[in-house]
Image (cartoon, rainbow, N blue to C red):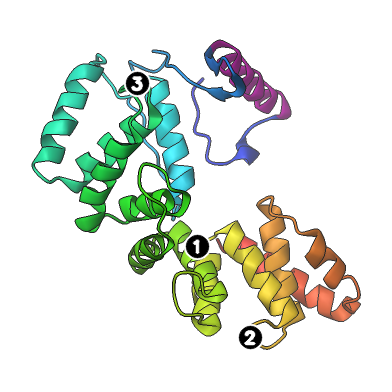
Amino acid sequence: MPRSVVSIDDLTNEEMEAVFQLADRFLADMATPDKPYRIRGRTDLADKFILATLFFEASTRTRLSFESAMLRLGGRGGPTNREEAVKLLASSAKLGNPKAAYNLALLYLDGQTLPQDLKRAAELLRVAADAGNPEAQYALATFYKEGTGVEKDIDKAVRLLQAASLADNVDAEVEYAIALYNGTGTPKNEAAAVALLRKAARQNSPIAQNRLARVLVTGQGVPIDKVEGLKWHLVAKTAGRGDPMLDEALAALSPEDRAKAQEGARKWLGTR
């Protein structure tokens, strides 16, 4: 009988194993020939279903990975007509629709529905970024940072990260905070960097939680607070962001302070 699954706790061990086995089958059937760990191609498994991604403050990477998976499963509802969909996206993008330009850029970047064209993807991302789309601003910042489809330009990358972070894009907040902290492409400002890391940490970014823990434990840019640092280190570890350096730096913390940090982490994790 169908039922709702809200979290992994709703699945039995056997059901989780079945999910892993299904993922292995997808990988075996759809792997890239020269990179067997990477999926390419599509299936029509979900072409009769309407799928939606529902996240609370999801990171851009998380959301896009789920949306990409939906596209590969054909889950857009009704008959699939990719050529018509691309024409509609292209028409809307030409009229200046930022979301259409952004989505069309993803298709050029993915290289499945359309031939991969990184330069065209960058052009479309620029259209969407100039219109104020924070996801496009973050994606284009990554292009400039890595020299993908555009000439590498750290200053432009940082300006785009700043714009996206002002629009509450969590990934941009983290990367802009790191740029501020290191003085990369922008004047060094450790206080502003730590404030952004705190904001992103409270938005459930494991990277920000780890970085915040590091600055609190080492006292770089903020007063040392190892209890608060351990709290955020424990929270980040629950999301898979372990850090041996922090484990070593906090090993000598007193049992009382460790208990305070653990209680703080429990409260945070229980109120998310």
Residue at mark 2 to residue at mark 1: CA–CA distance: 19 Å
Residue at mark 1 to residue at mark 3: CA–CA distance: 36 Å
Estimate the x, y position of residue 257 in percent, counting from the top left. Answer: 82, 80
Instruction: Identify which amino acid the numbered label 1 is placed on.
Output: Glu
Task: Provide the secondary structure element on which disc 1 rests.
Answer: helix
Query: Residue at image x 61%, y 36%?
Result: 10
Viewer-proximal residue among 136 and 155: 155
Estimate the x, y position of residue 260 in percent, counting from the top left. Answer: 77, 77
Q: Would residue 223 be seen by someone viewing this image from the given angle? A: yes
Q: Which quadrant, please, contains the C terminus? A: bottom right
Instruction: Identify which amino acid the numbered label 3 is placed on.
Output: Phe
Residue at mark 3 to residue at mark 2: CA–CA distance: 51 Å
Mark 1, residue position: 175
Viewer-proximal residue among 172 and 148: 148
Instruction: Identify which amino acid the numbered label 2 is placed on.
Output: Val
**In this view, which residue lies farthest toward the left?**
95
In the image, is residue 110 part of the stretch drawn in magenta?
no
Task: Provide the secondary structure element on which disc 2 rests.
Answer: loop
Q: Main secondary structure of the magenta part?
A: helix
Which image quadrant is residue 57 in? bottom left
Mark 2, residue position: 222
**Is there a contact, CB below 8 Å, between mark 3 and mark 2?**
no
**Is there a contact, CB below 8 Å, between mark 2 and mark 1?**
no
Which image quadrant is residue 101 in? top left
In the image, is residue 17 part of the stretch drawn in magenta?
yes
Lateral position of residue 103 relative to residue 211, left or right? left
Mark 3, residue position: 49
Q: Would residue 202 be seen by someone viewing this image from the given angle? A: no
**Residue density around tag 2, few if under 14, some if 14–19, many if 20 or more, within 10 Å:** some
In the image, residue 209 sits, relative to residue 259, either above or below, namely above
Residue stretch in magenta: 13-29
